[in-house]
Amino acid sequence: MPDAAPFRPAPAWLAGAVFYQIYPQSFADSDGDGIGDLGGIADRLDHLAWLGVNTVWLNPCFASPFRDAGYDVADYLRIAPRYGTADDLAKLVDLAGRRGIRILLDLVAGHTSDAHPWFRAAADDPSDHRYIWSAEDVPAGFVPSPGSRPGGYLPNFFDSQPALNFGYARTSADEPWRQPTDAEGPRANRAALREVMDHWLRLGVSGFRVDMAASLVKDDPGRRATAALWTELRHWLDRAHPRAVLLSEWGDPEVSVPAGFHADFFLQFGGPANGLALRSLWSNGTGTTDAAWDPLDCFFDASGNGSPGPFVHAWRQAAAALGDSGFIALPTSNHDFSRLNCGPRTAEQLPAAFAFQLTWPTLPAIYYGDEIGMRYVPDLPEKEGSVLGPRYNRAGSRTPMQWEDGPGAGFSTAAEDRFYLPLDPSPDRPSVAAQRADETSLLHLVRRLIALRRSAPALGHGAPVEVLHEGHPFVYVRGARYLVIVNPSRNATSWPTGVHAGRIAGARPVEARGARIAADGTAVEADGFGYGIFALPEQ
């Protein structure tokens, strides 16, 4: 049974976190081999500090054969040589800390690579229970043993990713590989997770984002046994590293946060209505090779057919369930799904999306390059497991960061044919340098919005939100101090404020483009793709 004792409160810094996700092989290359590395990230810390982000999450940087871009770990305690060394990570943590930036690592908890020494040993030793093995036959879903051990093993995703044994919530004498969660193998793996986390936390990282955190215990209705596992680990973390945090890739904050995570992401899967919360907001699709677009009518669609209602409902439900116990994180996109700028969505639609993300009471998470409007690049070759189906290639969201204009885009000094992935071939691709020089750019807007959020408690996570109009335009008040107007449609919209006119009249624009309030407060107007943040007069 899970420990019923309350968790230690989340570290105070987490409430003000603005996350920035870095796909390390695509961010910046410091040694000229065409692959991004830790030194490259260190070289670009000034960009992150200038932008205002304060918490960086790195995709896996551990030793790996890279059949799934590092999500197939061969040694949890060693940095992959392509990225550098543990000393390079320690240097990055130190340099980031001097700029007020914390570093989080990605913890792949549910499986390893088949190249991991644990698995190689288990493939020849029937008494080793670190993985899930059948005894003689190879049941459906299992992979034949690659060693002298008979039977087969259960993979989590690709065959090269054998599932670690955290037990089954429901056992069966007919299927002896279904070990209980308190068996020797599951206990050893929970101890190994503590060892891995302790190792890197002692080096100075501030926590972990946990990959597929809901997948550990098998055949687990309601994820109750998996929740008990994370509850145990959270109590250990509270004692051993009280300022560290755990973020989950679970997609259901109502389950994951009570289980022990400090925060969970709204994702395209899992959680409320099977991921509807995020998909109904900005449906970034699943990396389809043609349009990279999910046909769902999302709110941030130029057609104006979507509604913020499903997202608002899901957020309210999750926020009410969590109370002060944890946080919901809202990402622009990530390494598994298409970017904000994808399919029919264009760069002119992005400012309104960021105006919403950075003023809503969730923890914002910006995927590298989204701050300049990098696009999902279709029709790329398969790279390190990026293709998951005939219409699902994740490579288009993993292209090199566009630092400068011209050849190489400032990503690497290597010849472009040696780059980890090709650059966006568009002649008008955005760059950090060009947008730094243009104060009207998306980059400058994102920077101003982050600064405003960090300086105004009424726009932060803890301040209340009051939705005044759940449509086009979307209108809400934060902390009784700021009125926010967002119109993701290409069409101009307006809303008669009615009983709210008196409190809105005289509102002062703080950050606005194409959004207006009538002088007497009786109407709100927004041009196509318009947005505005207005300071309300004191009552």
Image (tube, helix red, strand yellow):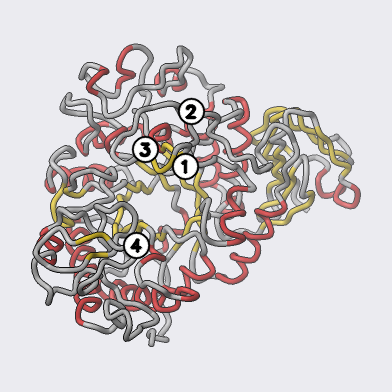
Give me the disc on residue 337: 1
What residue does disc 2 label? 375
Q: Amino acid at mark 4?
A: Gly
Question: Element type at marker 1?
Answer: loop
Q: Amino acid at mark 1?
A: Phe
Labels 4, 2: front one: 4
Residue 281: x and y in percent read 63, 46
Circle 4 residues within 10 Å: few <14, some 14–19, many ≥20: few
Looking at the picture, does residue 116 appear above or below residue 502?
below
Q: Amino acid at mark 2?
A: Arg
Residue shown at 26% from the left, 24% from the top: 419
Residue 373: x and y in percent read 50, 28
Specify which label sits upstream in the sequence, 1 or 2. 1
Circle 2 residues within 10 Å: few <14, some 14–19, many ≥20: many
- Residue 76 shown left or right of residue 467 in the figure: left
- Residue 267 shown left or right of residue 227 in the figure: right
Residue 480: x and y in percent read 71, 55
Give me the disc on residue 49: 3
Quarter location, residue 320 = bottom right
Labels 2, 3: front one: 2
